[in-house]
């Protein structure tokens, strides 16, 4: 009889290193809420963070399932947790786990719906559908070169907007502007993963923007996404959308340059040199986001 999988295996499967990508936009929305003139429901912030983590973990499990079924994840490829390739979990267990986490996120999110109404419900449904159909049939937009665009929208503007609305019960055009830098960088995480996996994705008949563009143009896209995050902050400061302290994000330039150099020197016949580029880009995304929300908070409070 097969032993039940332990907690360590499940933690490996949900890939917690990636969770900064879902926590950061929620906290950016919270930093923006500091300047809201009306009442702010701060007690809902932990709920928003937990729901975000549940949906992200669910998406990772569902992605693990469909990538394995499609042949994207194999013993020699990068990117997955390898729990299915190494038979640490069954495909049925991984899919069931993902669906259970989606359900948990939805049920917990109803608390926020109670306080803020139908807009939060619809934002949550869009988030769940976006997470499932990232790889889930019959859509699987990751496999048809729409991953970069939709991940940018779902984990950038949608999450910042959702966080801000849950806390304030209102919307401001500045919310979308402030979401752009984190949207650029979360898209950079996915794009870094896809750039590294160009050869393996082609073997699995998966079309990502990276393998449609080719290595040289894919490198340019990565540089534009990372550089665009800094340019967006400069433009927001110059237009008064955020305070000058938000320029603290430039303290994160050194790891950004290090990652861009790794991408610049990458070759398809030696992708092991950038095996961890998605993790490193996620770490940069978190540092940038932490500095951004710190700068925004200082600008408002002091």
Image (spheres, rainbow, N blue to C red):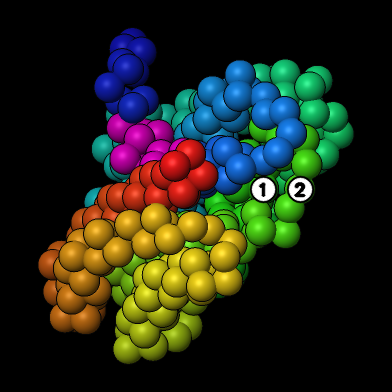
Image quadrant assignment for residue 213: bottom left
Tell me, yes or no, whether the highlighted magenta stretch contains residue 70.
no
Q: How busy is the neighbourhood of tag 1: few (under 14 within 10 Å), some, or many (20 plus)?
A: many
Residue depicted at 44% across the width and 42% down the height:
302
Image quadrant assignment for residue 36: top right
Residue 255 location in percent, x, y?
20, 62
Left or right: 259 in relation to 1: left
Q: Is residue 17 visible?
A: yes
Q: Residue 215 — which label?
A: none
Residue 45 vertical position relative to residue 22 in the rendered view, above or below: above
Residue depicted at 80% across the width and 20% down the height:
114
Separation of marks 2 and 1 at Cα, in angstroms = 7 Å
Q: Residue 171 — which label?
A: 2
Residue 87 vertical position relative to residue 237 in the rendered view, above or below: above
Task: Give the magenta range.
Answer: 12-23
Please say if the residues under marks 2 and 1 sit with CB atoms less than 8 Å apart: yes
Residue depicted at 53% across the width and 30% down the height:
49
Nearer-the-camera pick, 130 or 225: 225
Residue 194 vertical position relative to residue 65 in the rendered view, above or below: below
Q: Mark 1 points at which residue?
A: 161
Nearer-the-camera pick, 205 or 168: 168
């Amino acid at each position: 009889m097969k032993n039940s999988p332990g907690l360590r295996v499940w933690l490996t499967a949900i890939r917690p290193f990636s969770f900064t990508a879902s926590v950061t936009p929620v906290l950016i929305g919270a930093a923006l809420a500091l300047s809201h003139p009306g009442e702010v429901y701060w007690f809902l912030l932990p709920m928003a963070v937990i729901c975000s983590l549940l949906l992200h973990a669910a998406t990772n499990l569902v992605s693990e399932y469909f990538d394995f079924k499609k042949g994207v994840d194999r013993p020699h490829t990068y990117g997955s947790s390898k729990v299915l390739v190494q038979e640490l979990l069954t495909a049925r267990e991984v899919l069931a786990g993902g669906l259970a986490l989606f359900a948990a996120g939805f049920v917990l999110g109803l608390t926020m719906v109670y306080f803020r109404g139908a807009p939060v419900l619809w934002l949550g449904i869009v988030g769940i559908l976006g997470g499932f159909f990232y790889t889930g049939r019959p859509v699987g937009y990751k496999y048809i070169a729409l991953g970069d665009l939709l991940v940018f929208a779902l984990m950038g503007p949608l999450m910042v907007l959702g966080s801000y609305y849950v806390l304030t019960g209102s919307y401001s055009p500045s919310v979308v502007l402030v979401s752009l830098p984190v949207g650029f960088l979360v898209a950079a995480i996915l794009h870094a993963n896809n750039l590294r996996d160009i050869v393996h994705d082609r073997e699995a008949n998966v079309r990502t923007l990276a393998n449609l563009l080719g290595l040289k143009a894919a490198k340019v896209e990565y540089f534009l996404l990372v550089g665009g995050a800094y340019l967006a902050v400069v433009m927001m400061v110059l237009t008064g959308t955020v305070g000058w302290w938000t320029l603290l994000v430039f303290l994160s330039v050194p790891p950004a340059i290090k990652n861009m150099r790794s991408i610049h020197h990458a070759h398809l016949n030696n992708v092991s040199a950038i095996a961890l580029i998605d993790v490193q880009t996620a770490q940069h995304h978190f540092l940038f986001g932490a500095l951004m929300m710190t700068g925004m908070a200082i600008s408002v409070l002091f």
